[in-house]
Image (cartoon, helix red, strand yellow):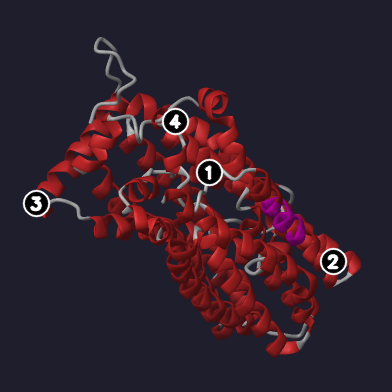
Amino acid sequence: MSPPSRGPNAPVSSSTASTDSILADATRVNSHLGPVRPAEIAIGVIIGRTSEFFDFFVYAIASVVVFPQLIFPFVDPVQGTIYSFALFALAFIARPIGTMIFMWIDRNHGRGAKLTTALFLLGTSTVAIAFLPGYESIGAAAIVILAICRICQGLALGGSWDGLASLLSLNAPARHQGWYAMIPQLGAPLGLIVASALFAFFLANLSAEDFFSWGWRYPFFVAFAINVVALFARLRIVVTPEFERLFRNRELQPASIMQTLRNEGGTVAIGTFVPLASFALFHMVTVFPLSWIFLYTQELPANFLIIEMIGAMFGVAAVVASGILADRYGRRLLLAICAVAIAVFSGFAPQLLDAGSVGEGVFMVLGFILLGLSFGQSSGAVASNFSQQYRYTGSAITSDLSWLFGAGFAPLAALLLASNFGLISAGAYLLSGAVCTLVVLSLNRRLVLRGHEDEN
């Protein structure tokens, strides 16, 4: 597959030749494996998204149970966690920049180079954290190194957009758009389950000294290995004849970010703000509860991670249910109902985190059910609403901005509010996301994430 933006007389660089070699090798492998079926596309999407979210949650859990003590021992635990969450947000700020950089690589050197480079950067920056010395060893340099690694993770996540979710959506039957839209979203709860299980095992079976010395580092090594598996799974798809046909037809061709924003800015804006309720809830039931439990209760972190795993299992079921409900009643209606439910949830649920293990369990199960139903459709059918020329890039930048505005600062905002004004105030950030979703839904009936009723 030759990158379309290179002219016939353009020189072939060594990086381009390397990329062509990678894709040629992948094509030869595919010639022995046979054509890729839609089910394999779905599996490739799930593997890719699970690997990304596993990396995400490994860092997120460490930002609560490791980094405040390892990197910020000079302040109290609450302040250290706040600083840690500030570094956590850096990846979301860097992600749109990563999309700009890697879209250029895609246009000039091909999708194989883009994916390989992005996932190599993601894996390298993640595994580098496993070797991170503490503040007591190298001082403020530990903070700088962790910040650089986190920024590199964000840049890589911006570049890891492969268009497979768009390919899946574009090939979905008209009456099953919701079902196909939920498939990529399964990666979030699955990634959380694996990451939580690893940390729970080490926390439960190691002494505090061993865990902070070396035990916490192992999940970061595992993340690198999973990224390698995900790379091969995704390259298996991107060299298929169907993917190449869509690429040639401009349906999955990278475009300039600025040009995309000039021509599709309204679609990007709607796609960014419609899912804010679910994206804000995302961190309110994954990262923030762990920080509150760790800082303000006597609950063992390993025990709460098990509760979180159980909640995530309910989240998997709810994501699947969202596909069924969206196809039956419409995505727009489902998102509106979920936004109202999230607004109600924000008014009482955070206080359950101070109600013992039963309250924690109720909070997590209810939260993950709501998250699964809303998040399962939060990115559905974005691709089909962009014009063909800007579909690939528009979908990527919309996802970046949704994560930035909806989720990037949620743990930081929630912990600042809760630690200063009590748990009830932690729902304010979540409520703002729900209100934003409802306002956009009411103001724009022809929203990007149109529902089943709009398609008939």
Residue highlighted by disc 4: 390
* Residue 326 image offset from top left, x and y in percent: 47, 62
Disc 2 crowd, CA 10 A, few/some/many (<14, 14-19, 20+)? many
Name the amino acid, label 1. Val
Q: What segment is highlighted magenta in the picture?
A: 430-438
Q: Give the CA distance from mark 1 to mark 4.
A: 14 Å
Q: Secondary structure at mark 2?
A: helix
Magenta residues: mostly which secondary structure?
helix
Residue highlighted by disc 1: 448
- The residue lying furthest to the front in this view is 456
Mark linked to residue 425: 2
Earlier along the polypeptide chain: callout 1 or callout 4? 4
Taking the spot 53% from the left edge, 30% from the top edge, the residue there is: 264
Mark linked to residue 32: 3
* Residue 99 image offset from top left, x and y in percent: 51, 36
In the rendered image, the quadrant that contains the N terminus is top left
* Picture layout, residue 408 above or below residue 245: below
